[in-house]
Image (cartoon, helix red, strand yellow):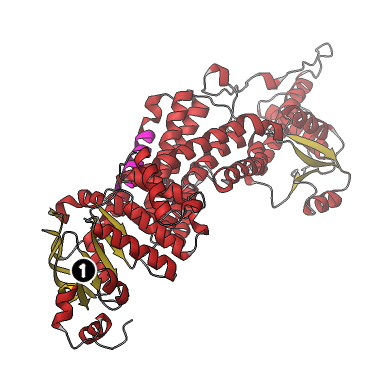
Amino acid sequence: MALIFIMPLALVIVMALVQDAPFRDYQELKLDALLVDLDADTLGVKMRKAFAAAGQVNLLSEKDSAIARARVHAGDFKIAIVIPEKTSEILRRKTRQLITTVFANFGLPADRSDSVSLPSIELKIFVDPALKANYRQSLSSGMEKIIANVQTAWILDELQSQLSEGRPDTKKLEFDLSKVVTIKESYATEDKYRGFLLNSVQHNVPAWTMFAMFFILYPLAGNFINEREDGSMLRLRLISGSQVPVITGKFTFYFLVCILQFLMMVAVGIFVMPLLGLNKLVLGGSGALILLTACCVAMAATGYGVLIAVYFRTAQQALSFGSVSVVILSAIGGVWVPVYVMPEILQTVSRFSPMSWGLESFNDLFLRQASMQTILPNILRLTGFALVTVSASILIHNSRTVV
Amino acid sequence: MNVVQLEHLNKQYHKSGKLAVSDLSIAIPEGAVFGLLGPNGAGKSTTVMLLCGLTRPDSGTVSVMGLDMRHHGNEIRKKIGVAPQEIALFPSLTAGENLLYFGRMYGLSSKYVRDQTEKLLHIFGLTEKSGKQVHTFSGGMKRRLNLMAALLHEPKLVILDEPTAGVDVQSRNMILNYLIELKANGTSIIYSSHVLEEAERICSHLAIIDEGKLITTGTLELVKEKHQDCGNLEQLFLKLTGKNIRD
């Protein structure tokens, strides 16, 4: 009972909790970062404003770059940004020299008072080695964008300054360049699910439910082999030669257990997960199609369990092979990590995992509100897998039964 | 009329390469208590498995109640009752539940099974243990229940493989008395054992096999008559199968 119901529930809750943070990393997690503003000028102010507006990084001030580095090294912060002294001033002067060069090239009057060769500006970022590469990249890109914006604003400012030479009545204009081009993201889902993303609960509930359903082989094979060893299976063979009722009886019982597992897991996703501070499981697609997919996964899982139970002669063989094979099928099926992040060869192999077919169908239904037509190929694969495993089980069992 | 006819049966276990049954031909008359005797490894259990259709012969034919096992295996199994050497029961079910389950698997009505269960539990002295799980039973109680499961549907042929193995004297006596009663009612019994006193007590016919081959067969009197120099069945058995220890 505990193995069939309690353990899978515990597993799905623990996995959803564990993977909640990594999922939020990509979507909503706010990262604390140190800012050492030795410049104490415009760039630091602009950077604070830009990061505050983006909302993903919370900048905290630190005065000493050595301390900032030490705190990142100690793991207190994931990242520290150092703006060296006079960065804003050098950037401003470089901008002015740039405009002067352009004006001179077109024969326009220009301010040639500053012709000193300036050093290049180098902003430093101290990064915790544990910080994900994509996070580091997005932070660097964000900083480059901020600097580019500041520089563009200063170019415009300098242009206006130099063009207004000798025109005391001309007023400088302020431009908001951020409004020129905007990017609007939207998800290709139905209206009522707009803005709804894959999160820890949406991934883990179907994924680990399937894992648990395939682990039905554990009680199934254990029970089957026990019956073989304690002689009750022999009695059934002595009563009737046909093993179809024996196999189908076991199949039906454990199939229903799998469905019950699925319903319990879904109920936990909807009612219990939110109580633990996690997202609520959203069943985006049709309830009938979700139940159909669950039935097909349950058939495939039970069929696999029956085959393992029939094929292996001892409980030790069946349970060792069975549990390791389920872990492998789940790994290549995308239960642990999504298939698309796997190497190409594993992505190819994953097409042969029934868990991949099931997970793909659940994702299609939950996130994309897929139609029957979309999930049909995977439904057929799962049903075919169940038919093949049950037929093979009956053949093997009958061949060992006899005449 | 013969209730069982074995003709030129051969069976070799491919893994071990052992020839378990070799050109075995036996005829068992209807209403007989037929002792299938032999030392350890003689091929008794393999012969019983062939009789029940639990294993397929390499060659030869098995005919039970006029039906060929190759074509009527299921039909034959429904008509015979088998108490295998291993205890073939669900240990987590009670005695009553086991009998009810097996009776229903035979296609008997619930009422018939309940009546039969009550009768057999009474005969074998297990009425009070009907509600107890089988795993709590002693060896003798399990052995009796194992036999009861074979008798539920009142078969015309009962095959018993070492039915008294590991049971106490009282249980053995009870089992043997019941078998004598069955014989009196016209039930044919195949009794595989190496307990020769029991065989001598209840069998009307016998076959002694060794290394898969038939050594002798016939009525108990006829076999004894052939070997008048032997005082009893045990001496006859040792004379025919030798005194070497078997594994």
Left or right for B46, reference A158: left
Image quadrant of residue A108? top right
- Horizontal and vertical percent position of residue A52: 77, 29
Q: Residue furthest right?
A: A63
Verify whether residue A387 appears in magenta: yes
* Residue A357 seen anywhere in this rendered image of the structure: no
Left or right for A91, reference A282: right
Extent of the magenta region: A378-392
Q: Residue at x 87, y 37 (%)?
A: A40
- Residue type at numbered disc 1: Ser
Q: Residue at x 24, y 86 (%)?
A: B231
- Mostly what secondary structure, the magenta segment? helix
Q: Quadrant of the C terminus of chain A?
A: bottom left
Q: Residues within 10 Å of mark 1 (few under 14, many from 20)?
A: some
Q: How many marks?
A: 1
Image quadrant of residue A231? bottom left
State whether residue B41 is above or below residue A293: below
* Residue A366 seen anywhere in this rendered image of the structure: yes
Name the foreground residue: A325 vs A145: A325
Q: Quadrant of the N terminus of chain A?
A: top right
State whether residue A144 is above or below residue B89: above
Q: Residue at x 22, y 67 (%)?
A: B34
Chain letter of disc 1?
Answer: B
- Horizontal and vertical percent position of residue B185: 24, 55
Left or right for A116, reference B104: right
State whether residue B49 is above or below residue A59: below
Q: Residue at x 39, y 67 (%)?
A: B172
Name the foreground residue: A11 vs A367: A11
Q: Which residue is mark 1?
A: B204
- Horizontal and vertical percent position of residue A344: 44, 48
